[in-house]
Amino acid sequence: MKNLDQATANNSYGLLHGWAMIWTLLGIFVGGMALNLTPCVYPLIPITMSYFGGRSGRGTINHAVLYVIGIAFTNSILGVFAALTGGLMGSVLQHPVVLVGIAFLLTAFALSLFGFWELRVPFQVMQIATRSHAGLLGSLFMGLMMGIVAAPCIGPFVLGLLTWVASMGSPWLGFVIFFTLSLGLGVPFFFLAVFSGNLNRLPKSGEWMIWVKKLMGWVLIGMAVYFLQPLFPKALGIYITAGTALFAGIHLGWIDKTKAGFKVFGWIKMTIALAALAFMTLTIGTFVTRGPGAAFHSYQGDILNQAKIRNKPVIIDFSADWCSPCRELDNVTFHDRRVVKMAQKDFILVKIDLTRKGNPDHEKLLKKYDIKGVPTIIFLDGKGKEIKGLRLVDFEPPQLFIERMIKAKQTL
């Protein structure tokens, strides 16, 4: 178990330093900043700044830092809690009914952001959250409570992100993701607190904030489609994803007639719309033009014995359709031409599909190799023994995976 935990930490560390995770965290940070433009949060800016307005110099900075820490602490704890439920959530996500239920919930929250219904915070809770407190602890308390006050707008988006984090099953990544979101949400308040004299330069509240809510609604629709993908054939799932981006771009850029009192808003609308259309084109183009993936064999009783007779190393991939890192491995790493070429020439590939339980042969392998979750990829040497140092329990980009394959070949 200790080795597996260490492997999880190592792979999470590698994932965080991969370009994919860097761009993901950057997108989450920008998303957190965008949440400040929603109708529930934006009007809080002058109120919050008035709290900091009586302070100057280092005192203002200290209060602003504690305010951001308060926001980050609340959301980060949520992220860790969601990730800790990942094992349980992963097991129940095997059922199509659960996937449909999650997608329905995300869609319902999206409809609230589109204005079809309204999410309200109980009045008593709102009174507690908005109660004024003095001193440094007061700034910390305001940050802790800000998520409650802003819940009608940021709540649906945060709940959608919680669902995604839970499916990843990594508490450390859950903390990092929600800490990044909190920084995006809180950093603008920090700078506005320090430079509170610039409040008169902010755009006035108005209809444009409704458009921001609709943008967040489309993000939740995209997450709903993501969770439904295991229920569709791969090609259909790709086209549904692309179609969602197409409709989002057309709606946000052209159908929606929201206007604002500042010129840059029109450019923002068009940039987001064109980005959605570019994503649609890239999604379809990548799927159509990519080559064949690595050819995995279904597990059969004698396949590992055949590998030992031939003295060939084996890659065993324990995966499931409901596992998001598993799908990323299939779509990216195992479709990389270099990985496919080396695997076909030097390895025997075996896929253990754990989407459905009840296969006795699979259960024996889970116990034999002490598999705790998916994805888990193990490497066997030419004698059929696991090469312990090469076990992988998370997504890994092609180049790093190729390095593992080279090390496995060197054991022959």
Image (tube, rainbow, N blue to C red):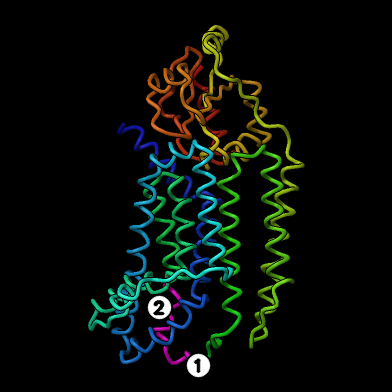
Q: Is residue 400 visible?
A: yes
Say which residue appears at 49% left-offset and 29% top-offset: 377
Neighbours of disc 2 within 10 Å: few (<14), some (14-19), many (20+)? many
Specify whether 4 is left or right of 400: left
Please tell me which residue lies in front, 342 or 326: 326
**Which amino acid, mark 1?**
Asn
> In the orientation shown, which residue stands out farthest toward the top?
309
Give the percent coordinates (x, y) of residue 404: 52, 31
Label 2: state its secondary structure: helix
Specify whether 100 is left or right of 121: right
**Which amino acid, mark 2?**
Phe
Look at the image and tell me in which quarter the N terminus lies: top left
Q: Which residues are magenta?
A: 186-199
Say which residue appears at 60% left-offset and 80% top-offset: 208
- Disc on res. 200: 1
Q: What residue is shown with label 2?
A: 190
Neighbours of disc 1 within 10 Å: few (<14), some (14-19), many (20+)? few
Give the percent coordinates (x, y) of residue 204: 55, 88
